Image (spheres, rainbow, N blue to C red):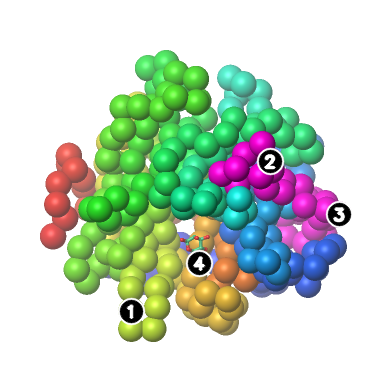
C-alpha cells in the first residue's frame, strides 16, 4: 500500500455552505456536477431545509471554485402531487449527459413513505425538467445511468438494500422506464475492511480507454458512528458488469475539520465531478459531514496507475474474505 495522496483539497474549502444560499436552509451538500456547453460549471446541490426535507438547487460558476450564482428559489423541489414517492424530499442527484437523447439525465433519491427509491428526470437547461418517475422499489439509492447503450440496452447502476446487505447492482432497460436483467456487480467486503458495513456508487462512472472508473463510498461502522470514505474500482469497457480490479485501501477520507464535524460527522460523499479541458484533471465535488460542499482535484492517469499498483484483480462475484 502506498502513501500517495490521489486527491488534493482546494485551498478555499468548503466552497459552498448554507450561509451563502439566497434563502434560509439548514445545510447544502452532496452535489451533482457537470460542465454546460458555454463552459460554466453547474452543481445541482442537495439542500436540506429546516423541516428536514431536501430539494435540489442549481449553482453556476465560471471557474468551478467561486463566484457561485444560485437560483433564487429551489430549482427542483419535490413534486408530491404528481410524484408521491417524493413525499419526504429529493436527495443525492447524479447527472449524466446522454448524447443519444441530447439531454442531461438526473438520477436522484426520492424519499418515499416506504423508503428511498431511485427516480429519473431529464433536462436540457436545468431550468425545466421532465420527470420519468421512480424506477426501483425501496430501499434503493446511489444510482447512475451510463451515457450509452450496451447491446441496445440502457444500463443503470444502483444500490438496493436486501436481507443480504448493501451491494451494487446493474440493471438494463430498453426505454429507461422498465428495468430488468438485474446483476450483482460489486459487493461490500467483510469483517475488518474499511468498506465492510456498506458501499454505494459515488459519482457517474469515468470513461477511459482502460475501462470505466468507479468512485464509490465505503462505510465503516464504529463505536461512535459511521465513517464514509471513497474507494476506486475499474469495470470493463464493453461489459460494465465485469469488475476488472478493485482498490484495496480507501483513497479519500474525512480529515479536514469540515469533513470531521457537521450534522453527520466523518463523511465525505461524492456525487459528481467535472473533467478539465486537459482531459485528465478531475474536479471532485463532494459533500462534507452532510453540511457543506468541498472540492478536491485528482488525475485520471494517476487513478488508473494507482489501481494497477494497489488493486486486487476481480473474477466473477464470489465471497471476499
Ligand atoms: C447516506 C446518504 C447520504 C449521506 C450519507 C451520510 O446514506 O443518505 O445522503 O450523505 O448517508 O449521512
Residue contact between numbered discs 4 and 2, judged by CB atoms under 8 Å = no
The region drawn magenta spans 58-86
Q: Is mark 1 within 8 Å of ligand 1?
A: no
The numbered mark at residue 222 is 1
Quick check: 84 left or right of 314?
right
Which of 43 and 244 lies nearest the eye of the viewer? 43
Q: Nearer the viewer, mark 3 or mark 2?
A: 2
Q: Nearer the viewer, mark 1 or mark 2?
A: 2
Which of 78 and 67 lies nearest the eye of the viewer? 78
The numbered mark at residue 268 is 4
Which residue is disc 3 drawn over? 72
Give the class, few, some or many, for how many residues have Cα within 10 Å of label 3's Cα (few <14, many ≥20): few
Q: Is mark 4 within 8 Å of ligand 1?
A: no
Does the rendering let one see residue 224? Answer: yes
Task: Measure how far apart labels 3 and 2 are at the Cα level.
Answer: 23 Å
Which residue is disc 2 drawn over? 81
Residue 64 colored magenta?
Answer: yes
Would you identify the image quadrant in which residue 4 lies?
bottom left
Quick check: 89 left or right of 71?
left
Quick check: 96 left or right of 40?
left
**Residue positioned 68% across, 60% down in the render:** 47
Task: Measure how far apart labels 1 and 3 are at the Cα level.
Answer: 40 Å
Give the class, few, some or many, for how many residues have Cα within 10 Å of label 1's Cα (few <14, many ≥20): few
Where is residue 217 drawn, in percent x and y? 41, 59
Q: Secondary structure at mark 3?
A: loop
Does residue 151 lie above or below 205 as drawn?
above
Residue contact between numbered discs 4 and 1, judged by CB atoms under 8 Å = no
Amino acid at each position: 500500500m502506498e502513501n500517495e495522496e490521489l486527491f488534493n483539497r482546494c485551498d478555499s474549502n468548503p466552497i459552498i455552505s448554507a450561509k451563502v444560499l439566497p434563502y434560509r436552509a439548514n445545510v447544502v451538500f452532496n452535489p451533482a456536477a457537470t460542465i454546460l456547453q458555454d463552459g460554466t460549471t453547474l452543481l445541482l446541490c442537495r439542500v436540506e431545509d429546516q423541516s428536514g426535507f431536501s430539494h435540489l438547487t442549481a449553482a453556476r460558476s465560471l471557474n468551478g471554485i467561486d463566484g457561485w450564482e444560485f437560483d433564487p428559489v429551489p430549482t427542483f423541489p419535490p413534486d408530491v402531487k404528481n410524484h408521491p414517492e417524493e413525499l419526504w424530499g429529493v436527495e443525492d442527484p447524479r447527472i449524466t449527459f446522454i448524447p443519444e437523447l441530447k439531454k442531461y439525465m438526473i438520477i436522484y433519491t426520492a424519499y418515499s413513505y416506504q423508503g428511498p427509491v431511485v427516480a429519473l428526470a431529464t433536462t436540457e437547461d436545468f431550468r425545466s425538467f421532465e420527470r420519468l418517475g421512480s424506477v426501483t422499489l425501496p430501499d434503493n439509492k446511489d444510482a447512475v445511468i451510463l451515457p450509452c447503450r450496451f447491446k441496445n440496452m440502457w444500463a443503470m447502476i444502483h444500490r438496493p438494500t436486501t436481507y443480504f446487505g448493501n451491494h451494487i447492482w446493474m440493471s438494463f432497460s430498453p426505454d429507461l422506464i422498465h428495468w430488468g436483467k438485474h446483476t450483482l456487480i460489486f459487493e461490500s467486503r467483510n469483517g475488518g475492511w474499511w468498506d465492510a458495513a456498506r458501499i454505494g456508487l459515488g459519482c457517474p462512472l469515468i470513461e477511459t480507454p482502460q475501462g470505466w472508473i468507479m468512485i464509490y463510498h465505503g462505510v465503516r461502522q464504529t463505536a461512535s458512528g459511521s465513517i464514509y470514505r471513497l474507494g476506486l474500482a475499474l469495470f470493463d469497457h464493453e461489459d460494465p458488469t465485469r469488475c476488472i480490479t478493485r482498490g484495496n485501501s480507501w483513497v479519500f477520507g474525512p480529515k479536514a475539520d469540515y469533513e470531521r464535524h457537521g450534522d453527520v460527522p466523518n463523511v465525505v460523499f461524492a456525487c459528481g465531478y467535472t473533467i478539465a479541458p486537459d482531459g485528465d484533471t478531475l474536479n471532485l465535488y463532494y459533500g462534507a459531514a452532510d453540511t457543506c460542499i468541498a472540492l478536491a482535484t485528482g488525475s485520471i492517469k494517476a487513478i488508473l496507475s494507482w489501481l494497477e499498483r494497489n488493486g486486487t484483480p476481480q473474477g466473477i462475484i464470489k465471497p471476499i474474505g
